[in-house]
Amino acid sequence: MVASAGPGRAAKTLRVSTGPGQHDRTCEDQPVTAGSRELNRPATVRLDVWLDVACLFKTRSEAQKACSGGKVDVNGNAAKPHRLVRVGDALAISRPMGRKQQVIIRAIAEQHLPKNEAKTLYEDRTPPPSPEEIEMRRLERIYRATLAPPRAPGKRERRALRALKGKD
């Protein structure tokens, strides 16, 4: 493969050699930069795939559920998981406790990247939480920590329940 560009400049075409004695073909999908991880990036990608690759959701199935549940808006409209997104689209993602994460897509990728590279795929425009929201989150964490997790009754508790019910 040969990218035709001057030093420090983006190439407009990518020349791919198909083998000895065969003609070269060119791909003009998107400009190629010299330091890019992929030489030929797509112009669009599925929303659920992009959300997973950009590390905004842990898994693609989580991203699909969020999209299907109406928790993700693209350019102000509710989006399904199969919607194609492109550079410049604005996303609004509903998060717990009423927060909305505002994101603008800066780059497209189909395959997983290291997390620090994945963060370069978008620009997060979510306003910082207010002091009231921070205090509310702190109180919620304290409340959840004091609750005992539900568990199955032990041997003594089962015997006591049976005695109360009049069985045995």
Image (tube, rainbow, N blue to C red):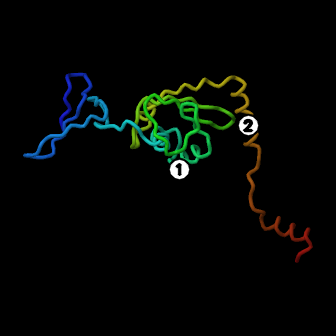
Of residues 48 and 148, which is closer to you in this image? Answer: 48
Residue type at tag 2? Glu
Q: Secondary structure at mark 1?
A: helix
Residue 74 left/right relative to 50: right
* Residue drawn at the location 33% of the way across and 37% of the way down: 41
State yes or no: discs 1 and 2 in contact (Cβ < 8 Å): no
The residue singled out by tag 2 in the image is 140
Q: Which residue is mark 1?
A: 61
Crowding at label 1, few (<14), some or many (≥20) Cα neighbours within 10 Å?
some
Q: Residue at x 41, y 32 (%)?
A: 107
Between circles 1 and 2, the one closer to the viewer is 1
Label 1 to label 2: alpha-carbon separation: 27 Å
- On the image, the x and y values in percent for residue 125 come to 55, 25
What is the secondary structure assignment of the residue under circle 2? helix
Q: Quadrant of residue 42?
A: top left
Which amino acid is tagged 1? Ser
